[in-house]
Image (tube, grey):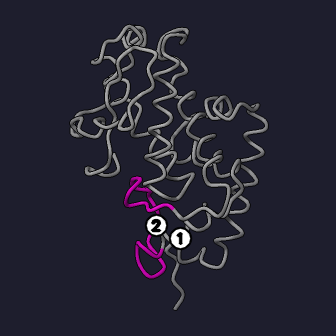
């Protein structure tokens, strides 16, 4: 989870009132040492019935990935936290009409987070701080780790929204092609096209520093 001092999500009661301003104010107080809880077919139903523990478990299981996804999309961890909050508020409002268990929940949450992120920035994307959104394995090169990351961050931020979303979902979030396509509400073939164009753009953008990124040094 990105920052210990960040705002957190409050388990919400099952009522029709609007959530308070600090609607997601306690989620980051959940123990960060624990692994996310496993999927539970009845957890959504219990959360919809007002079980605060079930709601807290849902948030604990899915919030880190949603926040990380939004951070890569927006390039701003603080903005990403706002998107994550809005995403879970929408989930809470949908609990009563959710069909099935947790199957499909991750894709739904990612879809909402991606769409909110695209709607939010509507302008140049600030490069994400990888120190805030998690580690990304990259080979040694350039002038050091921060310089390496800066080049990759800038290249990712320069991509069109849908290409960046496809790459983030598949390469950073670990979704399968089918899951990512479902998240973006497109066919697998359309996803592959976005990925191919995004990778090509990244290769072109990073071409001047490719040798350094790969750790190839010339005497």
Would you call the spot at circle 2 few (<14 residues within 10 Å), some (14-19), or many (20 or more)?
few
Quarter occupied by residue 53: top left
The kind of secondary structure element at disc 1 is: loop
Left or right of 132? Residue 118 is right
* Real-space Cα separation, disc 1 to disc 2, in angstroms: 6 Å
Q: Which mark is residue 139?
A: 2
Residue nearest the viewer, comparing 45 with 65: 45
Q: Where 145 falls versus 218 (above or below)?
A: above
Provide residue 64's location: percent of width, then percent of height: 39, 40
- What residue does disc 1 label? 214
- The magenta region covers 128-147
Would you call the spot at circle 1 few (<14 residues within 10 Å), some (14-19), or many (20 or more)?
few
Determine the residue positioned at 32% across, 40% down: 8
Q: Is residue 170 visible?
A: no
Q: Main secondary structure of the magenta part?
A: loop
Q: In the rendered structure, are the residues bearing label 1 and label 2 in contact, judged by CB atoms less than 8 Å apart? A: yes
Q: Which of the two discs, 1 and 2, labels the residue nearer the N terminus?
A: 2
Q: Where 46 falls versus 10 (above or below)?
A: above
Q: Is residue 112 visible?
A: yes
Quarter occupied by residue 192: top right
Q: Quadrant of the N terminus?
A: top left
Determine the residue positioned at 23% across, 34% down: 34
Left or right of 89? Residue 10 is left
| Residue 207 lies within the magenta run | no
Q: Where 185 falls versus 197 (above or below)?
A: above
Determine the residue positioned at 76% across, 54% down: 197
Provide residue 26's location: percent of width, then percent of height: 28, 35
Q: Which mark is residue 196?
A: none
Residue nearest the viewer, comparing 123 with 162: 123
Quarter occupied by residue 181: top right
Determine the residue positioned at 68% across, 35% down: 184
Q: How many marks?
A: 2
């Amino acid at each position: 989870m990105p920052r210990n001092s960040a705002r957190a999500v409050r388990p919400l009661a099952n009522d029709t009132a609007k959530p308070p301003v600090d609607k997601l104010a306690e989620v980051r107080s959940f123990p960060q040492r624990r692994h996310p809880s496993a999927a539970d077919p009845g957890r959504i139903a219990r959360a919809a019935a007002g079980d605060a523990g079930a709601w807290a478990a849902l948030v604990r299981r899915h919030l880190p990935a949603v926040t990380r996804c939004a951070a890569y999309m927006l390039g701003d961890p603080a903005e990403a936290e706002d998107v994550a909050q809005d995403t879970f508020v929408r989930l809470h409002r949908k609990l009563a009409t959710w069909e099935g268990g947790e199957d499909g929940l991750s894709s739904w949450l990612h879809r909402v987070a991606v769409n909110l992120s695209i709607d939010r920035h509507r302008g140049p994307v600030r490069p994400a701080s990888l120190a805030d959104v998690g580690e990304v394995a990259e080979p040694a090169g350039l002038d050091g780790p921060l310089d390496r990351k800066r080049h990759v961050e800038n290249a990712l931020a320069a991509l069109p929204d849908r290409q960046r979303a496809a790459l983030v979902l598949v390469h950073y979030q670990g979704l399968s092609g089918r899951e990512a396509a479902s998240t973006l509400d497109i066919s697998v073939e359309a996803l592959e096209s976005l990925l191919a164009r995004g990778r090509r753009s990244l290769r072109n953008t990073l071409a001047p520093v490719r040798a350094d990124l790969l750790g190839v040094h010339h005497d």
